[in-house]
Structures are given as structure tokens and as C-alpha cells.
Amino acid sequence: MKNLKLHVSLENFFVEVGSLILFTQNVGRQFLSSPFEYRELVKQGYYIGNKTLPLVAITAFIMGMVLTLQSRPVMLDFGAVTLLPGMVSVSIVREIGPVITALLCAGKISSGIAAELGAMKVTEQLDAMEVSGTKPLNFVVATRVIATTFLVPILVFIADALGILGSFVSINMYEGTSFVLFISQAFDSLEFYDIIPSTIKTFFFGFFIGLIGSYKGYNTGQGTEAVGMSANSAVVTASLVVFLIDLIAVQLSNLIYGV
């Protein structure tokens, strides 16, 4: 019985992966097909960015403060408080900023897209688009995937900046440090190795966050309960994919830069 359940689980897993790959191929074709929905792209970009920015900004600022407050006693014991701005900036830019922001986007954006498309699927709006000659994959899916692909890196950049600002505020709770000196110490520790890989992987974060949310919503079952299940599944799957992409990116970076 256990072997049978394992076999069924593995079969469902590979069927899901295969369906996602085919869905990705179909969406990829829409990027090059005409007409391209520029207005819908701008609309989705504004909507997604406007709804997500406050959450990302507040979280990043607090994250920078907390990281500094937690690290300061340890650095103080080793007499290396002057290295604190550089340590925090490297930690935020290389890993914490991109991953935490991507996870927030997975919870906020991916679930929202899945719920929206799931509701459209249940109410047969997607079917109506096909009947009227409008391509749902082009108008509904491709625009959202492209929007998230380019918006997540922007949100990560803002989160990094606010996280470093939060670190500056946290340091000034204990000792007076000029902003210019803090920024100088923070950026002296950053190298291209810290910035380039972390920036590249954010585009993959954004692409898969939008893609998985769209896939789950586009393939929602019947009934309102299925919409909630699709949104929940999108969050879980997108979060796992973010960690998987981050692991692959770190390994590739270490191989390329010989670390």
C-alpha cells in the first residue's frame, strides 16, 4: 500500500512538472506573437508594484534594523564594530534582500495572480476570451509574467536600499555615525561578485513567481473552493522554487568566480 501511494505521488509530481513545462512553452510563444498587449502590461506592472511596494519597503527597513541589532553585540566582542556596515550591506545585497523580497512577492503576487485567474476560470471568463478571439495566454498570462519578471528586481533594489538605511538608523541608536561615513564603509565591502549574481537571479525569481501563479490559476478546478486551493498551492510552490533557484545560483556563482 505504501509503495502504491509513493508511486501515485511520484506520478502526480512528474505529471505536474510536465504540465508546467508545456505551459511555460505556450506562454513563451506569446512573448513573440502579435498583437502584444502593452496597455495590459503597464496596467499589471503598476497594479502589482503599487500593491507590493509598501509591504516590501516596511519589511526591508525592519530587516536591516534587526540584522544590525543582532550582529552588533558579536562584532563588539571581537572589536570589529567598524566592519558592521560592510557586513550588513554584503548580507543584504547578496542573499537576505533578494530572497526575503522574493518570498514576500511569492506570498503577495503569486497568490493574487492565482486567485484572480482562478476566479476568471471558474466564472468562464477565460473561455469567453477564446470564443471572442482574444488569446487568454497573451492578454492575461504573458503580461503578468513579464510584469513580475521586471518588477521583482526593482523591488529587490528598493528593499536593499531600505535595508541598508534601516541598518544606519539602528547603528545611530548606539553611536553617532555620519551618513556619508556609513555609506562609504558599506559600499567599500561590496564587489561585482556580490551584486551581479544577486541581480541576475532576481529576474528568475520574478519570472517563476508570475509563471507559477498564472499556471495554478489558469488550471483551477471547478468551484470557489478550488480558487483558494490554487492560491495556496501557488504560494507554496513559488516559495520552494525561490529557494531552489537561490541554491542553484549560489552554486553557479561559486563555480564561475572560483570561490
Image (cartoon, helix red, strand yellow):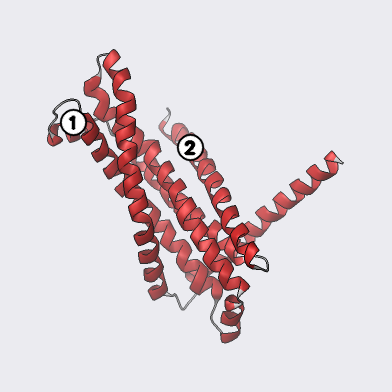
| Residue 28 seen from this side | no
| Element class at badge 2 | helix
Give how far across and how far down residue 182 sits, in percent: 18, 32
Q: Is residue 89 left or right of residue 232?
A: left
Q: Residue at x 33, y 33 (%)?
A: 66
Give how far across and how far down residue 56 sits, in percent: 36, 49
Q: If you read the primary sequence from the N terminus, does the residue marked by circle 1 or circle 2 appear first?
A: 1
Viewer-side residue, 255 vs 47: 47
Q: Residue 115's quadrant in the figure?
A: bottom right
Q: Residue furthest top?
A: 78
Q: CA distance from mark 1 to mark 2?
A: 37 Å
| Element class at badge 1 | loop
Give the mark count.
2
Badge 1 crowding class, 10 Å Cα cut-off, few under 14, some 14 to 19, many 20 or more, is few
Q: Residue at x 61, y 78 (%)?
A: 127
Q: Residue at x 70, y 50 (%)?
A: 13
Which residue lies under the disc numbered 1?
A: 172
Q: Is residue 52 left or right of residue 216?
A: left
The three-letter amino acid code for the residue at tag 2 is Leu
The three-letter amino acid code for the residue at tag 1 is Asn
Mark toward the viewer: 1 or 2: 1
Q: Is residue 14 left or right of residue 175?
A: right
Q: Residue at x 46, y 36 (%)?
A: 250
Q: Is residue 239 left or right of residue 124?
A: left
| Residue 80 seen from this side | yes
- In the rendering, which numbered label is found on residue 22? none
Which residue lies under the disc numbered 2?
A: 252
Give how far across and how far down residue 189 sits, in percent: 26, 30
Image quarter (top left, top right, bottom left or bottom right) of the C terminus: top left
Image quarter (top left, top right, bottom left or bottom right) of the N terminus: top right
Give how far across and how far down residue 119 sits, in percent: 57, 69
Viewer-side residue, 209 vs 191: 209
